[in-house]
Amino acid sequence: MMKRSILLLFALALALASWPGTASAQNRRTDDRPFRTREYDEERRPRHFWQDDREGFYLGLGAVANITTETDNGLSRLLESGGGLNLFAGMRFNRYFALELGVMGTMHATGETIGADYDSGILNAVTLDGRVFVFPNSRLIEPFVQTGVGGYMFFKEGYAEKQLQGFGFHVGAGVDFRLSPLITLGLRTLYKGVSMQNETSWYTAEEDVFMSLIDVEANFQIHF
């Protein structure tokens, strides 16, 4: 009887040991990390200090108030302040720097300083700018300084006749509000100094004229 009881207990122990889910602690998986995938490794791979998830291409559209400031020899005395649109595309290379290409068009009424024989004019510009973000670790609010150059054209009475063309520089500052990885709202102010060639002496007897402008812009950006 005693021998039979020992055999039954031994058989029961073998059955429990072979039952699924009752493996010994030595054979049990002790690594509780998720199954390693390519995405898992990339998320935990250390980034270099210059890399950032804000890098990439973006498009923007801005509403511009173009304020003319008078100079002694300048087209700024002829035109009143105006407004228009600025369409731009940029590349954010890292958390510190972005490069931006823009096309701007603003409409201006004729000033009363010099009795011109037309009522309005259009100022167009193609610009190239660099933006440097002064607080690169800030993700929601991103102030920046901006500078660049551009080619400018002035048309009188719509686009019927191009009168002046030239080059200019601009410098200023602004701030971007990053609402999400996709959407940004921006504000910026730029001073623009533009030298126009006046070969036909349409405006004054001087061969060249100068425009001094201040742009105030509110824009909307989409990031890709």
Image: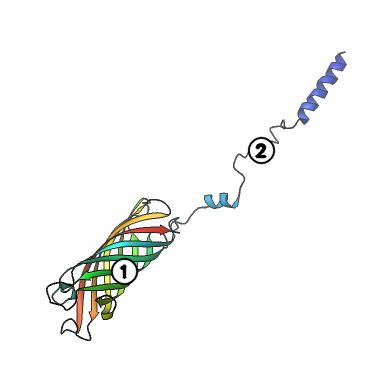
Residue labelled with disc 1: 104
Colouring: rainbow
Q: Where residue 154 sits: x, y (%)?
A: 26, 76
Q: Outermost residue toward the top?
A: 1
Q: Secondary structure at mark 1?
A: strand
Nearer to me, 161 or 40? 161
Residue labelled with disc 2: 29
Nearer to me, 31 or 123? 123
* Residue type at the position of mark 2: Arg
Residue at 27% x, 72% y is: 169
Residue at 33% x, 59% y is: 219
Residue 165 visible in rendering:
yes
Locate residue 32 relative to residue 103 in the image: left or right.
right
- Res. 214 image quadrant: bottom left
Nearer to me, 208 or 27? 208
Q: Which label was assigned to residue 30? A: none
Residue at 26% x, 73% y is: 122
Q: Is residue 137 above or below residue 101?
A: above
Residue at 28% x, 66% y is: 84
